[in-house]
Amino acid sequence: MNIFMTGATGFLGGRLARELIHRGHTLCVLARTPEKVKAMFSQDELSSITVLSGDLTAPLLGADDEFIARHDESFDLVLHMAALVKFDEELRDELFETNLTGTKQALGLAKALHCPRFFHVSTAYTLGAREIGDETLYATDQAFHNPYEESKAHAEQAVWAARRDLSVSIFRPAIIVGDSKTGEADSKFTMYGYMRALEVFKRRLERKGAPVGPIRLLGSETGTSNLVPVDYVADVLLAAIEHARPDTIYNVTNDAPPRNETMLEYMKQALEFPHLKITETAKSSLSNVEQTFNEMVKVFNPYLNRNISFNDTNTKRLLQDAGFKTLDLNERSLRRIVNAYYETK
Ligand SMILES: NC(=O)c1ccc[n+]([C@@H]2O[C@H](COP(=O)([O-])OP(=O)(O)OC[C@H]3O[C@@H](n4cnc5c(N)ncnc54)[C@H](OP(=O)(O)O)[C@@H]3O)[C@@H](O)[C@H]2O)c1
């Protein structure tokens, strides 16, 4: 299959691009820094890749008339996964420009190229403040935790509206973590942002040399972290290449997510930092030291703090149709994912 792909230089995209190439597909990838593509992929892999130098925020992603004429009807699929994955309120305009306008430009390019299918990688957290996630389109006039979720919810609406012109599928991963078999991850965000903050915080305390007592982290003791390994998310997208049903939404989520307490235990052991405890207490009761740490990780709290149930019936059926395994993220894999992060530091 000939695929036009955005986000191939990212954490999920890099992994998926390699899997696609190894299965014999050819890729044209959007890259704002084409040298990054050359540096990331082997010579052998590069022989299956061409590059469109551009940007999500440019009209038709930067494709000119010559590109469009040359590639008219040549792609079987547009696989759109590039996005700005940051949660800060100050980045609201940039998030909407990249994630919403960028998605509209990707749709515009798919139409200009007369491409029949469009895959959109969204996030499970377009559900906003709901505690149950369905595989249906969510309203955008609801509460969101940050402009990232909101921009992605609006982008889903744009994709859904385009199904008049081409067949669309929306994939909503939860929190993507490293490979379930090796632990390897090329990510600095979500759980990795949290783990990094723990490490920085530990080092700061060690430098001060003062005795360390219990440190409370704000969060739900019974809450869960909806983690999905990158190989599982890639598998779902690979299965979808042949088996996705048109105009369908897929929650790429974990229906047996680990408890926050459990994940923190693995992190404490890997980091040799036993003083941490998750607790639901008032912020005002925290010491200055505790407040400093909780401030460092506050953008991650909506994801490591709740107990959401996601319905992933469509995804399970997709995997079954393709003969792929469903998710089994056991303790050994979770420990490996946490340990791999701290071992490479
Ligand atoms: N990571 C997660 O936990 C998670 C969870 C749920 C959903 N998702 C979704 O999964 C997708 C991939 O996420 P990821 O974790 O792989 O993200 P990532 O590692 O941050 O990669 C983002 C990709 O988007 C590209 N990109 C960003 N802004 C761009 C722009 N203006 N023009 C062109 N390309 C641009 C980046 O290119 P550069 O290499 O040039 O920066 C990179 O290839 C995103 O749609 C995200 O919303 C991620």
Image (tube, rainbow, N blue to C red):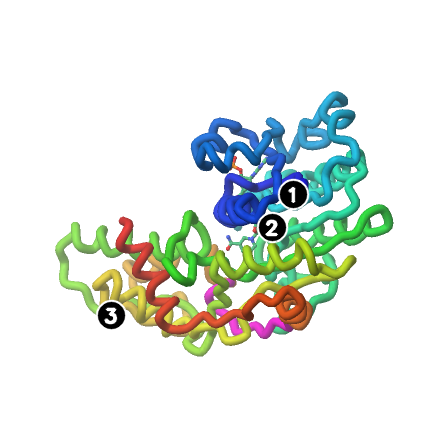
Pick whichever, 324 or 147, lies toward us.
Answer: 324
Q: Position of residue 37 (x, y in %)?
A: 50, 33
Q: Which numbered marker is on residue 96?
A: 1
Q: Position of residue 122 (x, y in %)?
A: 63, 54
At 67% from the left edge and 67% from the top edge, which residue is drawn?
321
Q: Position of residue 300 (x, y in %)?
A: 46, 58
Q: Residues within 10 Å of mark 3 (few under 14, many from 20)?
A: few
Whether label 1 touches label 3, CB < 8 Å: no
Q: Residues within 10 Å of mark 2 (few under 14, many from 20)?
A: many
At 51% from the left edge and 33% from the top edge, which residue is drawn?
46
Three-letter code, disc 2? Pro
Left or right of residue 52: residue 35: left
Whether label 2 touches label 1, CB < 8 Å: yes
Q: Magenta part of the protein: which range? A: 303-311
Residue 267 colored in magenta in the image: no
Whether label 2 touches label 3, CB < 8 Å: no
Pick whichever, 156 or 239, lies toward us.
Answer: 239
Res. 93 in view: no
Quadrant of residue 50 within the rendered picture: top right
Three-letter code, disc 1? Phe
Quadrant of the picture in which ligand 1 is shown: top right
At 52% from the left edge and 28% from the top edge, which residue is drawn?
34
Q: CA distance from mark 1 to mark 3?
A: 40 Å
Q: Is residue 167 above or below residue 21?
A: below
Residue under numbered circle 2 = 147
Residue under numbered circle 3 = 214
Q: Earlier in the sequence, mark 1 or mark 3?
A: 1
Q: Earlier in the sequence, mark 2 or mark 1?
A: 1
Q: CA distance from mark 2 to mark 3?
A: 34 Å
Determine the main secondary structure of the stretch shown in magenta.
loop
